[in-house]
Amino acid sequence: MTGDQILGLIMLVGMITVIFVGFPISFTLLFLGLVFGSIGLGADLTFNLAYLQIWGTMKDEVFPAVPLFIFMGFMTEQAGLMERLFAALRNLLAPVRGSLYLAVILTATIFAMATGIVGAAVTVLGIMAAPMMIKAGYDARLSSGAIAAGGTLGILIPPSVMLVVMGPTMGVPVNLLYSAAFGPGFLLAGMYIVYTLGRSFINPSLGPPVPKEDRIADPWIVIKEVIVGVLPLALLIGFTLGTILAGMATPTEAAACGASGATLLALCYRKLSFTVLKNAAVMTMMTAGVVILLAVASNVFGAVFTKLGTAQVITQALAAIPLPDMGKLIVIMIAVFLLGWPFEWPAIVLVFLPIVLPVVETLQLGGMNKLELLIWFGALIAVNLQTAFLSPPVAMSAYYLRNVVPQWSLGLIYRGMGDFMIIQVICLAIVILLPDIVLWLPRSLR
């Protein structure tokens, strides 16, 4: 290894160490990239490289979709659409054992298609469902796991912000990544449902039906609530995602329509006010600012890291591992799984993904061509990174839930999430062994 390559390796180790200590990821990436770049490449080249990376990121025509999808999510949440959806499903499923688990996961799955915001989904589900679960005598560990795991589906199921960022990084159209994510996303949601209902039927005390006194007796009222709660949101989701999948609109154009549609729905439900609009706009700026700052910092760090030559050394070392192609893929998946614990997904997608992509492109698996291989790999990364929201020490879903349900301790929530993280790992293994789960829809759209 040359001196610059060793310097890049020290920069990588320093980044991991500093982030584990607790420093903010964005500023750590920027600081280390600029400092180590100045030492190894010179200040002029480093700052020119940083300028070009920042300018290139800001010019990317896909990135405007990020704040628009985030605004769409916050506006649907502020308009109370998630509450309406949950109430409708809860009343419809009330006589079933484990009905509240089922209502939580179905609400989270449908709402994930309206927003990719994990924090909002977990928080709102915690506020709505947790008191009902506690009152109905539901198992606290299973309840906390269902809410936390269901809320994280937004990172996988389109319109996932992560997939919007991943597309340009991998050189794969976002609409194909979106179509690829539906299979694993619905599979995972289905596995959650089978697990929670299965345990409720085996042991009814874990998830009894909703008490009769808390049910709505008139079936017509229930049907009306389902129509009012589900249909408008389904139309918004179908229009937004349908135009992307059909290739009729770019992600940015569809996101703009989705944001407008969510605002219109809030108006129709008489929930739109200056305060709601202001809250949605402020939360959008805060969330989008964090994502885009992470993207910029990751690109700067990644550019310096690549220019120092260390990325090429790591790529060559991965390619030289004496394992079959499937073995190399599993090694990469294990590495991403472990990196997801301390790191936010933008750092992994924008810094580590470009390092392993050259290796992935050489794999010969299942007779897939290069584009299909990258689409499949992107879906695997998305499923893998979803576990980061359920994995200590970061496990942001636990903190979101703990803030709104103080009756549940952090340890209890961690144990509940651990059960569902095992399900996620099983789902990842299934998707690795059965690529058609990912590829059937992208193939049909091409």
Image (tube, rainbow, N blue to C red):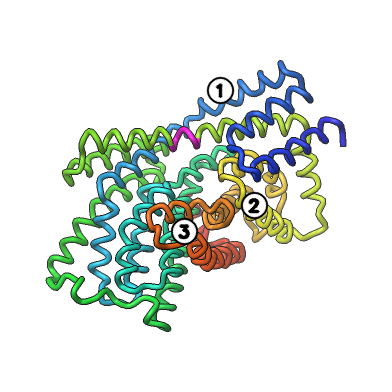
Based on the picture, tell me whether residue 75 belongs to the magenta stretch: no
Q: Amino acid at mark 2?
A: Val
Crowdedness near tag 2: few (<14), some (14–19) or many (≥20) residues, C-alpha within 10 Å: many
Query: Depth check: 281 or 192 in front?
Result: 281
Element type at mark 2 = helix
The answer to whether residue 354 is above or below residue 201 is: above
Crowdedness near tag 1: few (<14), some (14–19) or many (≥20) residues, C-alpha within 10 Å: few
Mark 3 vs mark 2, foreground winner is 2
Residue 303 locus on image (x, y percent): 67, 30
| Disc assigned to residue 185 | 3
Residue 91 locus on image (x, y percent): 23, 67
Magenta region: which residues?
A: 287-291
| Disc assigned to residue 55 | 1
Element type at mark 3 = helix
Extreme residue in the top direction = 44
Q: Quadrant of residue 67?
A: top left
Residue indicated by mark 2: 336
Q: Amino acid at mark 3?
A: Gly
Sequence order check, earlier mark of 3 and 2: 3
Query: Depth check: 87 or 28 in front?
Result: 28
Visible in this render: residue 385?
yes
Residue 337 locus on image (x, y percent): 63, 55
Q: Quadrant of residue 249?
A: top left
Q: Residue at x 71, y 57 (%)?
A: 331
1 and 3 marks in contact (CB < 8 Å) = no
1 and 2 marks in contact (CB < 8 Å) = no
